[in-house]
Image (cartoon, rainbow, N blue to C red):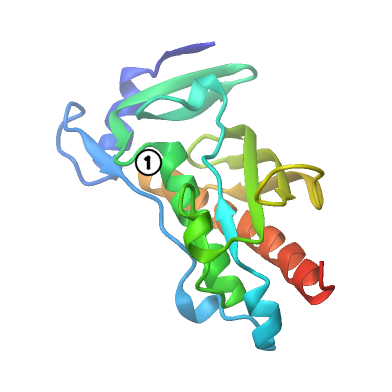
């Protein structure tokens, strides 16, 4: 169930983000892992990098997250909207973009692209991510539950199928801390996917 968040919480989040009024709209975007923290070690062979050509498909989100507002968990089975805090690019688009950037940096491959550009880099694999849950409350914990599949670009039998459960503490009471936790948890997911892709490439599949 989604309901408008309590006015007091809106005010606290707005003030915590540097706004003087709760009706000031703040746009948030997600960011990738810093370059210096994402270099593969040891560096991959040219053949392994070439095998990394990947097309990241549009990310699927539950209906509760398919909206511009940030969503916070307010209790068991209860979510609320932060009307004054919105995703600038759409949460699904931002997750897809960050996965592309993170996986490229973590693998050292420049041929990691978003759909529909796979043909341009002769993508050898296609990544599909289905987010089942991405919920949390400032000052508490952000939880990500997802399944992801790596398959040939034409579809067919999956080469990898994984279920992922990740958690990150939200280090603060404001919306900025919630967004920062999103960045960290997507970094964790990206590292998991990149590690599997590297093993796949080195195995010659």
Q: Residue furthest right?
A: 203
- Residue 116 visible within the image: yes
Q: Residue at x 74, y 45 (%)?
A: 164
Q: Secondary structure at mark 1?
A: helix
Q: Position of residue 161 (x, y in %)?
A: 80, 46
Q: Position of residue 56 (x, y in %)?
A: 56, 51
Q: Between 94 and 115, which is closer to the camera in this rendering?
A: 115
Q: Between 88 and 23, which is closer to the camera in this rendering?
A: 88
Determine whether, in the image, residue 22 is placed left or right of residue 188. Answer: left
Q: In which quadrant will I find the C terminus?
A: bottom right
Res 19 → quadrant: top left
Q: Position of residue 173 (x, y in %)?
A: 42, 42
Query: With respect to residue 81, does 87 lie above or below?
Result: below
Task: Tell me the residue that label 1 is attached to.
Answer: 175
- Residue 172 visible within the image: no
Determine whether, in the image, residue 204 is placed left or right of residue 31. Answer: right
Query: With respect to residue 46, does 20 lie above or below?
Result: above
Query: With respect to residue 177, does 74 lie above or below?
Result: above
């Amino acid at each position: 169930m989604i309901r408008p968040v309590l006015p007091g919480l809106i005010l606290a989040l707005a003030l915590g983000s540097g706004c003087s009024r709760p009706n000031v709209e703040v746009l948030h975007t997600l960011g990738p892992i810093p370059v210096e923290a994402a270099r593969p070690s040891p560096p991959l062979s040219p053949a392994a990098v070439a095998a990394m050509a990947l097309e990241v498909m549009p990310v699927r989100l539950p209906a509760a997250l398919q909206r511009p507002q940030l969503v916070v968990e307010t209790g068991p089975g209860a979510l609320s909207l932060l009307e004054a805090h919105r995703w600038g690019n759409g949460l699904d688009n931002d997750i897809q973009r960050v996965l592309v950037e993170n996986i490229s940096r973590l693998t050292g491959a420049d041929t990691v692209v978003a759909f529909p550009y796979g043909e341009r880099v002769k993508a050898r694999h296609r990544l599909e991510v289905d987010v089942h849950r991405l919920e949390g409350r400032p000052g508490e914990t952000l939880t990500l539950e997802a399944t992801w599949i790596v398959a040939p670009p034409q579809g067919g039998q999956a080469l990898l199928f994984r279920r992922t459960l990740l958690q990150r503490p939200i280090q603060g009471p404001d919306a900025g801390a919630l967004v920062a936790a999103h960045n960290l948890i997507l970094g964790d997911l990206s590292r998991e996917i990149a590690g599997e892709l590297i093993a796949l490439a080195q195995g010659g599949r």
